[in-house]
Each structure stands twice: as C-alpha cells, then as structure tokens.
C-alpha cells in the first residue's frame, strides 16, 4: 500500500528565510511521482513542483526545490526567501506507476512572520 | 481559459437529502477525481475515473456515487447514506496515465443542517 507522511502539523518561518517541509513516503511501485501542492485559505490547490522517481536531479521551480532522497524515501520541500504570501497549507502527494490514484499527506500549515 | 469548474461553491442540505456536486473540465483530460477534505486534514479519495463510462472507488466511497457519461463531466452525488457529509469537496483532473500533476477546481463546501 502507498502512504504519505507529513509529520509537521505547523511551522513558522521568518520572512526572507528558507524553510523545509518534510515528507516521507512508502510504496512498492517500481516508479512513481511525487508532488507538492499549496492550499491558501481560499481552498484552491496550487501545484508547486514534481519529482519523478527516476529523475537524477532534484526538481526546482523558482523559489521551490524538492530535496529527493530515494533511499530514505523522503521528498522534502524547500522554500527559499519566504514571503508573507507563502503562508498556507502545504501537501505532499504521490502517484505510483500502477494506478491513477494520487494520495496525499495530512499537510503542514506554514506561517511566515513579518 | 482552460480549467475545472465546480458548482455550487457553497451548498446547504438537510439530513436525508441527496445532493449532486458538479464538476466540468475543458482541459481534455482523461482522468478525473473527487476528493474530500475535512478541517485540518489531508485529501481523501472518494472516486476516480480513467475514461468515459468507467470509474473506480477510492478510499472512502461509501455513501457517494458518480457517473462519467462525458469526458468533460464527473458529477458527484452525496447520498443520504453518507453519515457525515459536511466537508470540503475538491474535483481534479489529470492528463494521462503516468504523467502530469492534478489540476483542481475551486472546491464545493457542503454543510448538512
């Protein structure tokens, strides 16, 4: 069975500093994709970044980077130079190669302090 | 603009009533999904559909039903059998089997009175 674990219910970070949101996963699929989404208070889900299990390099998208450690089954999101607008819920998600199902973690609520 | 449209955004229902949440996409995506989100929790999969006229149960399908008669549409019915239907419901779609992120609608918030 597939599982995503986010162990940080809430995080605080000072504006302009970097923050790491943790995500570990479990799957028996030979290949899989890992995703991070942002959910502001309005409720919409915003796609941030994707990492394929066979990608050699860690994914980056602007201020977002994914620290992918396959052996440890972790896919942590790093946000650099935090902004007030980064305050939101952040979800890690995974999809295996054998299924259309995307599964989500329970999320981390990030609060950026001025 | 391409995207996913969910309606209504807010819905109130009396106990014992069925309600249907609409989800329409014009992204030409094959796969569509319904998720439920409770306060402070992650997303749980209700149903998903890979192609027209085919759908599969997710992790919490009891008390829900869906149809997929058109590629663009994937409505969700919350039946009176659903014990605790008050929640935020998100519809999503994806392009293909092994590629692509989920694209989400803005969500529908259902409250049972």
Image (tube, grey):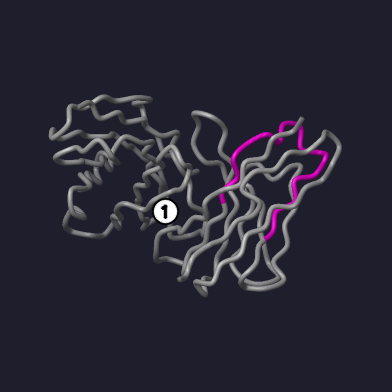
Few, some or many residues within 10 Å of mark 1 (<14, 14–19, 20+):
few
Q: Secondary structure at mark 1?
A: loop
Image label count: 1
Nearest the eye: B12 or A76: B12
Residue B80 position within the rendered picture, expressed as x and y whole percent measured from the top left: 83, 40
Judge whether residue B77 is colored magenta. Answer: yes
Residue A105 position within the rendered picture, expressed as x and y whole percent measured from the top left: 43, 38
Nearest the eye: A112 or A28: A112
Nearest the eye: B79 or A71: B79
Residue A28 position within the rendered picture, expressed as x and y whole percent measured from the top left: 42, 48
Judge whether residue B49 is colored magenta. Answer: no
Which quadrant does the N terminus of chain B fall into?
A: bottom left
Compared to A113, does B76 lie above or below? below
Boundaries of the magenta span: B75-90
A55 vs B52, left or right, is: left
Q: Residue at x 30, y 58 (%)?
A: A52
Compared to A8, does B31 lie above or below? below
Compared to A75, does B101 lie above or below? below
Which quadrant does the C terminus of chain B fall into?
A: top right
The residue at which mark 1 appears reads as A29
């Amino acid at each position: 069975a597939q599982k995503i674990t986010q162990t940080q219910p809430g995080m605080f970070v000072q504006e302009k500093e970097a923050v790491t949101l943790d995500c570990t996963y479990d799957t028996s699929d030979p290949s899989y994709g890992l995703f991070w989404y942002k959910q502001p208070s309005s409720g919409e889900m915003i796609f941030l970044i994707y990492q394929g299990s066979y990608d050699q390099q860690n994914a980056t998208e602007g201020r977002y980077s994914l620290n992918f450690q396959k052996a440890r089954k972790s896919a942590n999101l790093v946000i650099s130079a935090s902004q007030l607008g980064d305050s939101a819920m952040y979800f890690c998600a995974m999809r295996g190669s054998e299924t259309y199902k995307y599964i989500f973690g329970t999320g981390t609520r990030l609060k950026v302090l001025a | 603009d391409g995207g996913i449209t969910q309606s209504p955004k807010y819905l109130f229902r009396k106990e014992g009533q069925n309600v249907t949440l609409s989800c329409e996409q014009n992204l030409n995506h094959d796969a569509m999904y319904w998720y439920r989100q409770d306060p402070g929790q992650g997303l749980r999969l209700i149903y998903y559909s890979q192609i027209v006229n085919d759908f599969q149960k997710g992790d919490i399908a009891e008390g829900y039903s869906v149809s997929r008669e058109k590629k663009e549409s994937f409505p969700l019915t919350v039946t009176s059998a659903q014990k605790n239907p008050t929640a935020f419901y998100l519809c999503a779609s994806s392009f293909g089997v092994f590629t692509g992120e989920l694209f989400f609608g803005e969500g529908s918030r259902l409250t049972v009175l």
